[in-house]
Image (cartoon, rainbow, N blue to C red):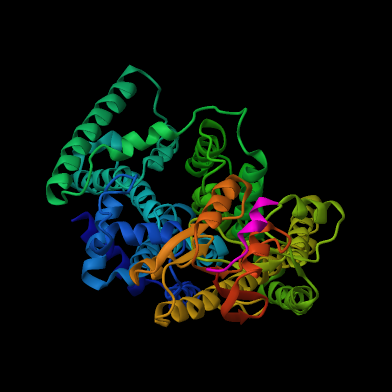
Amino acid sequence: MAIKNYFLSVRSFFVNSGKKEISIVLGLFVLFLLFRLPLLDFIYHQDEHKWARIVNPVFSLQGESVHPPLTEITFYYFGELFGYDHLRWLILLFAAACFWLIFAIAREHYGPKAALCSLLLFAIAPYSVIASIQIDIDGAILPFWILLTLWSFAKIDWPNFNQSVANRRWLIIFSIAILGGLLSKISFILIAPGLFFYYLHRYQAAINRRLFARVFYVSLAVLAALTIILLLLHWLYPPLSPVRFLEYTRNFSWFNFSSRNYFQVLFLVTKAILLLSPFLLLLLNLKNFGRRHEFWAWYIISGLFFYLVLFDFSNRTIDRYMMFLILPLVFIGGDVLAHWFNEAKNSAGRSFITKNLIASGIVLLPLGAWLALSYNKILPLVPKIAYLEQIKNLDFSFLLPFSSGSGPLGFYMSVKFIVLFWLTSLVAMVFWDIYKSAKFKIIANSVFFTAALIYCVFFNAELAYGWLYGSPDKVANSLFEEVVNNNDVGKVTTYNDTGTYELDRAGKHGGRFYTQPLFEDSSRRKMQQYQGYYTVVDFPEINKYSIFWKYLQSCGTVFQTQSKKINGYLFDCRAGDKNLFNN
């Protein structure tokens, strides 16, 4: 009944709202799809192909997931119905559901204009685009359960729970959301502090024994329900181990500060921040909104503590974990933008805002294109200190690879472009905060909004098409099509684990190698022992002075493909010079 009421409220929105608002919402949903549909055919990369192989019975890896079981089961049944090559569509469906939940929550809590701004940020933020098609949990599946939890929790009139039948119906939705989140990933618990303080603030509740007793009994009920559901899922899906994900948590090291790879953490977190776009600076305005965004403030604090302090994730895909910041950015940022535009409209009028936005675009768009198209060199992935040397020397004429162990394959972007647009956005925000003139504030807001918007468009276009520097995905598709169709090529070892799903499906996967220091010794041993073929999608680029590249160059090149600055190779190393590894 609660779900029925939601759809009735959606119907009411389309019936009672003005045509302009409806058109904007639908236009934003089209924009949401336009940035994501070109990415649905991207090859599975690293953790993505692990999911695809775990759930596909062909590979006999079912039940190998180290996460709670719901995601694996969902992937499995979707793959059975629509094919295991189309798992990105499932993630997109979850992301689309998030789109409409964001609209419902933001419109109810922050107003119609804030809802539209939140939808815009969700549609265009590069990290949100990646999250919407990444085959994993953090990007779209976990946010769906978080949003459903918050939405249903806020719908319940807790102090007068027994006085309304609707409360019980919403409690069912809330319970499903809680269980769905916990059965998807343990980090779902990060919303608990936010819900707790949201409840205290909304109802002015006192912290006493009665409150803690309620929390205790609810927790017991949730644990009991989880136990029953895990056993039921094991019965329905025998490969599932009900406790495997709990055993996996033993691998986490608590408060381990002495042996953390702090440079790796800094490098990956910085890339995550850059993918969130300069719109992330909107979070600096959180202090101006009092307790309006208390839930998201606590969610940010909990997430940063969990991922950067409590556990050592320095040798894991910590940049993917930073996706938890997308939802706070969307809600807080949308509210801030709506507040800005309302102030600007009231003080100077819509035409003045429009003129400033157009003027900012006329200046910044050609400047961005010039910076992106000017000379930019490619630095190898290793050593990473080379990136710091460039920055130390204030030489930003290089490309930064945006890739991770979580997929998709990635893209390059000019650091000159990144630095200028972040600085422009930051300066504009500082000017807005310092100056009191209403018209000057509007100019600063226009510059900030336009710079951040152009930044997002460039990032998303390069990810999808590789117009500026080339598409690693296009190179990978061409390379692995040749490998699969070439009957003379047997087992293949692939660089950076690229194309493993395609190779394994064709029965040609012979292993993988990496060039990072953490894997250097094992990769050298593999190359010394292995005689056969190697594939290299040279992204991020291998150091051309490294022992790995020297060895590959001693082999015969069977096939080569290129997309602008990105190359792909198939090497025949059956006669490669292994003496190079003895030097």
Q: Position of residue 527 (x, y in %)?
A: 55, 57
Image side of residue 322 versus residue 437, left or right: left
Q: Position of residue 452 (x, y in %)?
A: 67, 65
Q: Nearer the viewer, residue 399 or 179?
A: 399
Above or below — where is 292 with respect to 14? above
Image side of residue 37 versus residue 345, left or right: left
Visible in this render: residue 456? yes
Image point (63%, 53%), residue name:
273
| Quadrant in the picture for the N terminus | bottom left
Confirm whether the magenta stretch covers residue 228: no
Visible in this render: residue 461? no
Above or below — where is 285 with respect to 7? above
Q: Nearer the viewer, residue 374 or 143?
A: 374
Specify the segment rendered in magenta: 574-583
Image side of residue 129 versus residue 177, left or right: right
Image point (44%, 80%), residue name:
481
Q: Position of residue 195 (x, y in %)?
A: 40, 38
Q: Nearer the viewer, residue 468 or 507?
A: 507
Above or below — where is 253 with respect to 390? above
Image point (27%, 50%), residue name:
70
Image point (33%, 22%), residue name:
212
Q: Position of residue 507 (x, y in %)?
A: 34, 69
Q: Nearer the viewer, residue 307 or 342?
A: 307
